[in-house]
Amino acid sequence: MIIELDNVTTLYDGANVPTITNINLKVKRGDFIGVIGPNAVGKTTLLETINGVLKASRGTVKVFGKDASIDGSEIRKKVGYLPQDVSFDEESPFLVRDVVLMGRYGAMGILKSPKQCDYELVFNALSRIGIMHLADRPVGKLSGGELQKVMFARTVAKTPKVMLLDEPFNNLDMGAREELVEILSKIHKDMNLTTLMIIHEIDYLSKINVCNRVVLMRNGTIAEDTTPTKILKSKTLVESFRRDH
């Protein structure tokens, strides 16, 4: 297993109630898992706990066979994490290629200069996402959809083994979403990735068609761990999900 969560509960500092409780999850190499559920049920917390950004209050989290509470920084070198709602000031001095290069910092090492291979990976990521034309644009001048693609390119440039994507379709219209789905699917296969992706709308499952598993979260727990087909065929689950929204 690439990822194993055993009875994991995560409590934010200062909070009295855990955000996720008694989570048990096993993720195999090559899985593409859609994580769905209403707002504030712990989807983002789940990804942050796997990434070792948040430490589990109880239970164990293992990624690549290593304990996330001990080897979190080592694990993160092999994990590409795309948070939601990233923003830059309009006057930010960074160009798009500078931002994508940030994905290489962990591999480069502190205060090390980029090598030729780092630049090659940056431009390869820009090309894969279809935004090479944005390479020399100031990042603060981009639209929300353009910035979302830049952040995804930064994640790809890291050459991770695992990708954690928090609502990657934010700020994208339907055409751009369909385009990104095709890119996601190809990158997942070409790079032999294991991917967990938070999806806000259950209807996306029928349109995305890239997930082999779906984890449905409710009230900080995993309510269902099944296939997209079974989720969509269950009128009770679909109606319950829409009602919760």
Image (tube, rainbow, N blue to C red):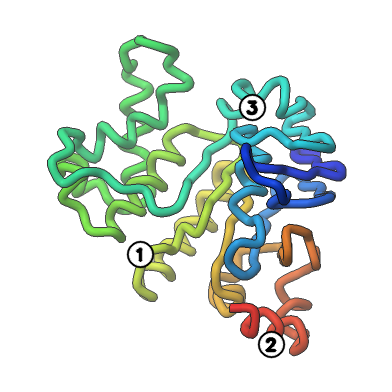
Mark 2 residue element? helix
Q: Which residue is mark 2?
A: 239
Indicate the position of residue 51 as horizontal and vertical percent values.
62, 36
Specify the quadrant that holds the C terminus. bottom right
Q: Earlier in the sequence, mark 1 or mark 2?
A: 1
Q: Quadrant of residue 178?
A: bottom left
Q: Are marks 3 and 1 in contact (CB under 8 Å)?
A: no
Q: Does residue 196 sit above or below 219 in this rendering?
A: above
Q: Which residue is mark 1?
A: 171
Q: Is residue 130 rendered to the left or right of residue 159?
A: left
Towards the viewer: 182 or 65: 65
Task: Kindly identify the amino acid type of the residue bearing the numbered disc 1.
Answer: Asn
Q: Which mark is residue 75?
A: 3
Q: Of discs 3 and 2, which sits in the foreground?
A: 2
The residue at 67%/79% (across/down) is: 241
Task: Kindly identify the amino acid type of the residue bearing the numbered disc 2.
Answer: Glu
Indicate the position of residue 59 as horizontal and vertical percent values.
84, 37
Q: Earlier in the sequence, mark 3 or mark 2?
A: 3
Say few, some or many: other residues with alpha carbon within 10 Å of mark 3 (under 14 / 14 to 19 / 20 or more). many
The answer to whether one can see residue 192 in this image is no
Towards the viewer: 176 or 220: 220
Q: Does residue 165 sit above or below 56 in this rendering?
A: below
Q: Are marks 3 and 2 in contact (CB under 8 Å)?
A: no
The residue at 55%/46% (across/down) is: 190
